Image (tube, helix red, strand yellow):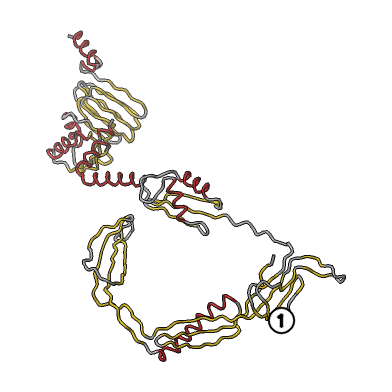
Amino acid sequence: MGTVLKGISHICGIGYDIASGGFKCSFTEKGAEVEGIRSLTSFSPERVAVSLKRGRLEIAGENLSIRALSRGYIAICGTVSSISLSEGRA
Amino acid sequence: MKLIKGYTAITVKGLNIEKLINRLSKEGIAIYRASRQEHKRLDFCVEYASRQKVIACLDNLCYNYQIEGDKGLLPLIRLLLKRAGLVAGCLIFAAALFFSSLFVADVRVSGCESIDPLGVAECARQAGAAGFSFNKPSAREIEKRIYESFGNISFVSASYKGLVLHIEVVEAQPAPAVIDNSPKDLVSQFDGKINRLIVYQGTPLVKAGDAVKKGQVLIGGFREKPGGERIPLRAMGEAYGVVELVYTERFECVRTELSRTGRFAEQIYIELFGLAFPVKRPDAGYATFEEETESCFIFFNNFLPARLVTVRRYETEPVTVREDFEKVKKVLVEEAQRKALEQAEKEGRVLGSSVSIRDEGDIKYIEVTLSVEKSLLINGE
């Protein structure tokens, strides 16, 4: 099953970890991008929280705003000070 | 790409904003530039294509929202398509501007004193710039042609202002006259009697009171040395003689004048770029008539130089008028004297005048005789 999923995710250009229910997060001082989110749970200029398939991700900072949000993807801009990940189902 | 497809900025007010964002995301609507400056307020953008879907979603969830505006090329095109008349007007205006940039309505020439302005305009026409034509040669070319055609031009400037070609000409100053110092006599230019003689240079050959003939030398172009030797020089001086000038005014006691009958016919037409578009034509053909023309611009700002011209023809008929000469004699004599003085002052200094009336039945002649002191001198050979 893992091999098939790996093949499909490769054809679709999606990371295997995301396809298998994981997530991908990349960030700089000026923003962050998260792939593999389920929903937005909280949004304010100081804090953006998203729920993942397995857990919850919180991005804290200043003047945070959503640059783009579509299904499974969020791009945040603003000054990011911390990112915290909590395990478990949100 | 976003600018081509367009996007819509929306402001939403309400509680549980996160729910709305998740709902939009679930519906497959991507949101951009979302910011939440207040707890109950969310500002965001969506693609213009998703606009109706978002509005339906917001209505469904009973949020208060406001469309801040549609931006981008696609919304602009849709907006313009809704206002086809406005677009057509803009296109017609742009086309009119384009064609007017190729069109010359009139050629105006200024600064001409000795040069004929019509000649300058003709020169511009030969260069291709005639009034009411679609040919628009460069101003430099017109300037060059005018400059080459007229020798006495020191500066010429051609410029297009709107639909009119303005040509400004500065004529060259005439060369200063060469002072002629060659020996010459001063001779009398007509018969008369010398009244005054002033000699600056040369030898006087007549004195005041002498009667002189036309062509007679008055001041000789020489200076005589004590030994009798004559040194030739240019005679200079002034010589005045008294001449009598007669001015005659004719007065007809019985004359025929044309008088208006009261009937008139009116012709109205619109004049645009030298063309006349009739509005109303007169149907009366009078044998004799007087014509009066009035015109005014139709548009106040003169954007389109269309003028409404009214030509009124008044029918006239010959009427015999009889006037008593004695009643108007004083006025007529004064008028004749005034006219005679005006003309005589151009000739020289008026010394005296007399008036006589010659009666020839219905026609009277008022003759004003003036004694005028006039310069006699002209240069001899």
B316 lies left or right of B150: left
Q: Nearer the viewer, residue B316 or A3?
A: B316
* Residue at 24%, 14% in the rendered image: A16
Image quarter in which the N terminus of chain B is found? top left
**In the displayed structure, would residue A5 be above or below residue B305?**
above
B208 lies left or right of A3: right
- Secondary structure beneath disc 1? loop
Image quarter in which the C terminus of chain B is found? bottom right
Q: Residue furthest bottom?
A: B326
* Label 1: few (<14), some (14–19) or many (≥20) C-alpha neighbours in 10 Å: some
Q: Is residue B130 visible?
A: yes
Q: Nearer the viewer, residue B12 or B199?
A: B199
What residue does disc 1 label?
B208
B317 lies left or right of B371: left
The answer to which quarter of the image holds residue B205 is bottom right
* Residue at 38%, 90% in the rendered image: B324
The amino acid type of the residue labelled 1 equals Ala
Q: Residue furthest right?
A: B227
Residue B229 position in % (x across, y down): 84, 68
